[in-house]
Image (cartoon, rainbow, N blue to C red):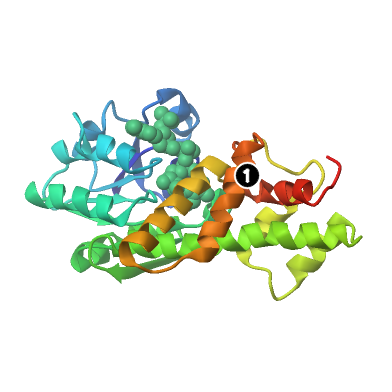
Amino acid sequence: MNVGMVGLGTMGAGIVKRLLAAGHEVTGWNRTKAKASELIRAGMGWADSPAELAGASEVVLSIVTDAAAVRDVALGPEGIVSGLRSGCHYLDMSTIDPDESRAVAAAFKRAGLTMLDAPLSGSPVTLEQGKASIMVGGDLGAFERVEPVLLDIGAKASYIGASGMAAHMKLAINLVLMVEVIAFGEGIALAEKGGVDREVAVEAMLNSVAAAPVLGYRGPFILEGRMPEHALADVNLQQKDMMLVLEQGRKLGSPVPLAAAANEMMNACRGLGLDRRDFVTAHEVYRRLGGFER
Ligand SMILES: NC(=O)c1ccc[n+]([C@@H]2O[C@H](COP(=O)([O-])OP(=O)(O)OC[C@H]3O[C@@H](n4cnc5c(N)ncnc54)[C@H](OP(=O)(O)O)[C@@H]3O)[C@@H](O)[C@H]2O)c1
């Protein structure tokens, strides 16, 4: 298929690599063109605007930072909506507020076009391993038509429900993921304070029933010299999702006390100047609170 990818950051670049490997014709666009060089060398085509990209693609995907960025690339001047052809589909894979996603979908509907929310659960690591899972909200027939493309990106593609439902489900998943990763830092710091060597503690935790896939690849980052220079998801990016979870809890009247506590640890990371590190760095905050020497 001809697939267009808007947003070539960490996740967008990873998705393009999987689509190219599966044999799709891929056209890309990114606000900062320099990030596309490696992908262009790997065979990706380039479009000068989201509208031009949409005009050349049967399926258009976007994955950008937040709702403001989605509005810019989807509805802004030279946005996807002004180039997408009838019968083709637009899927936004960013993690954003469900109501913001529904508003963009409604604008596409007014233009006689289809937009689906299609957030992805996984990291650059799971994406590369082909283990990411994609959830879709919106028109069921459109989901069925694009499903084969989604299965070339990740192992699972699930239809969640009406427009915005997949964006909502993604926040529920991220709530659990964020609490797990922060609790991991808390547990390891406690083990260390009691005298267990950090490396031994991490291994024991990852061998235990408490281990989840997210801890398997992220947990070892807290070992000496293992924190990656380029975070899988840094404190700022992850806190964006925590704020979305807190807001959903408020709007729906559904309490999220564990998410609130995890969010406080993100505030502490930022206060200590750790905001560009992968958010598993919350472990470092627990160590400092527990009186460890740095
Ligand atoms: N990292 C993860 O593990 C992960 C996993 C699942 C979902 N997500 C979600 O996926 C989305 C992207 O994450 P990422 O890790 O790929 O982030 P990233 O590496 O920081 O990339 C962000 C992308 O958004 C673009 N962008 C931001 N503002 C824009 C605007 N106003 N107009 C046009 N483009 C704009 C950036 O363009 P420039 O290059 O020009 O800055 C870049 O392409 C986020 O919603 C995130 O929550 C991330």
Q: At numbered mark 1, what does the secondary structure look like: helix, strand or loop?
A: helix
| Residue at x-position 71% and y-position 47% | 285
Judge from the rendering whether residue 256 lies leftward or rightward of residue 105; answer left or right: right
Which quadrant of the figure has residue 147?
bottom left
Residue 276: x percent and y percent?
60, 36
Q: Is mark 1 within 8 Å of ligand 1?
A: no
| 272 or 18, nearer to the observer | 272
Which quadrant of the figure has residue 177?
bottom right
| Residue at x-position 39% and y-position 69% | 254
| Residue at x-position 63% and y-position 44% | 268
| Residue at x-position 57% and y-position 58% | 261
Residue 155: x percent and y percent?
47, 64
Judge from the rendering whether residue 72 lies leftward or rightward of residue 285; answer left or right: left
For label 1, the residue is 268
| 160 or 260, nearer to the observer | 260
Is residue 96 shown above or below 73?
below
Residue 230: x percent and y percent?
62, 37
Q: Amino acid at mark 1?
A: Ala
What is the crowding at mark 1: few (fewer than 14 residues within 10 Å), some, or many (at least 20)? some
Would you say residue 44 is visible in this rendering? no
* Quadrant of the image where one finds ligand 1: top left
Would you say residue 244 is visible in this rendering? yes
Residue 198: x percent and y percent?
85, 55
Q: Split into 4 quadrants, where in the image is the C terminus?
A: top right
| 26 or 121, nearer to the observer | 121
